[in-house]
Amino acid sequence: MPKLTIDDTPVEVPDGLNLIEAARLCGIEIPHYCYHPALSVVGNCRMCLVEVEKAPKLQIACNTRVTEGMVVRTTSGRTHAAQRAVLEFLLANHPIDCPVCDQAGECKLQDYYMDYDRQPSRFELARKNHKGKAIDIGGGLMLDQERCILCARCTRFFDEVTQTSELAIFGRGDHNLIDTYPGRKVDNPYALNTVDICPVGALTEKDFRFRMRVWYLHRTESVCGGCERGCAIDIHHHRGRIYRFKPRHNPEVNGYWICDAGRHSFPALQSESRLVAPLRQADDRMAALGWDAALAEAAAKIFEYGRAYGANAIGAVVGARATNEEAWAMKRLMAAIGSDRIAGLSWSPADAPGDDNLLIRANRNPNTRGLAALGIESAALGRLGEAAARGEMKMLIAMRADLARALGEAEFVRQFGPLDYLVVLDTDANETGQMANLVLPIAAYPEIDGSFTNFKGRVQRLNAAFDPPGEARPAIEVIAALASHLEDGAAQKTAAMLAIPSSASEIFARMAAAEPAFSGLTLDALGADGAALNLAGE
Ligand code: SF4
Ligand code: SF4
Ligand code: FES
């Protein structure tokens, strides 16, 4: 670990770091445009120039590695003069777009001008070079060539990460510009990551442009539910609406990136089909009813079928979109009832993309591994369906499991048509819900605390960004409330088992105590990067 001095502070940092990363570890920001930790170093913007003792010229921090005894100055007069010169150069031909630019609020050109420059322009507005504006280059990207500072982050992303190389820098001198190759468009499933890494407003997202000023957005850390990778994301939201998903760095899962399908998966979470009140089938119509009446009816049916046919007349299917806590709470409920009929449903549409070599997984469920770690197996679904088809199972609770869509309507009707009573817990109206006796509206994953376990066994935390719509409630609260309705008429031992907590952290604690795969973990200690399942205990 080399010892060096940065801005008069002695520090010791890991060997091999460049000066930007070394300074960052000490809480010092060295401004930079072209450097990105996940891309090769090109050193073309010169914004990161710093003074290094004994070096005759200023050095670019992105391409200078720490050495023993180095003395670095990031705030000296020479450094400041260089930063101002670089900014003046970058702004020479930059358009006066800030009031109408969608990057305002997260633009490094604006930010660094305010932090390091603040000098009036010596360039005449009329003599600035003009280049293309608002060009649709494909991949959901809009390119403004005038705003580009030619840092080459986007070209390196397409060369090095997706290896699709759609963009390049063309032209000479101050006529340089970013463009697609003639006759080509951007076409790859990760294109929108370039919007995140473009430090200015040159690349913006077609679907987000002008929809919301970014300073109105709140940020909540979460996990994408689009596939079993479980990429770390930030949910950007305002007044209970999601405006965008952004990648959140997690070296254990997704690095700095997410796929475009995952990024665009949020509109489905707040669509018109969201369920906002409990519904009961009556006279071939679904009619709204209150939560108390709905839970009392479900509890009465559990008692009725349990008494008449035994506990195994009641079963549950948990979709692999459910969180670990929801799945465990349902497992606990079924154990308290005395039924061993519980199965998982991990289903992906036939047209879902296959696994690729970056992030995308063919399994579109975020928690298949979590269910398996809890012993809720998809393989048990067939046995459960046949028990229903034979009339041995009378009542089914389906949570986040659209069985009719997964099995196809004919097979769903063959297996589950003979049921006497079907309860559906879901976020949206769907085919299974249409055939249910009781539909209970539950919160979508951006609206709840909890966790998903990705396909590699990484347990990551979800945080509630805002409340669910209407009367929808978190599924763990619904299960806990149903359990407490059942407690009243239950024997003492069963009543104790039915005491299911309704907070995610309490359920996680109980789950970690009972399930070897989760032992030693707590929800609060998962941290931003999550934690590995206890694979020896799985
Ligand atoms: S479009 Fe953005 S990321 Fe690409 S070179 Fe220009 S400024 Fe850099
Ligand atoms: S790879 Fe999967 S988890 Fe990651 S962003 Fe895409 S859909 Fe979401
Ligand atoms: S960040 Fe070092 S030259 Fe651009």
Image (cartoon, helix red, strand yellow):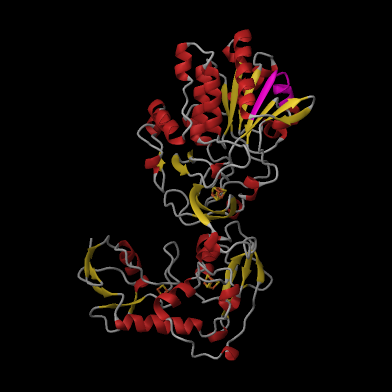
The quarter of the rendered structure image containing the N terminus is bottom left
Task: Pick the residue in front: 408 or 319.
Answer: 319
| Residue name at image x 67 percent, y 23 percent | 422
Q: Residue at x 54, y 85 (%)?
A: 174
The answer to whether one can see residue 319 in this image is: yes
Question: With respect to residue 386, does 259 lie above or below?
Answer: below
Q: Which residues are magenta?
A: 412-424
Residue closest to the eye, 307 or 514 = 307
Counting from the top left corner in percent of width and height, residue 475 is at 56, 33
Task: Name the quadrant of the C terminus.
Answer: top left
Q: Does 150 appear above or below 162? A: below
Residue 361 in the image: x percent, y percent? 56, 45
- Residue 340 visible in the displayed image: no
Which residue is at a point 49% across and 47% down the rendered structure image? 222
Residue closer to the observer: 335 or 50 = 335
Residue 420 is inside the magenta segment = yes
Q: Is residue 519 left or right of residue 235?
A: left
Q: Where 306 falls versus 469 (above or below)?
A: above
Depth check: 436 or 52 in front? Answer: 436
x, y (%) of residue 483?
A: 53, 22
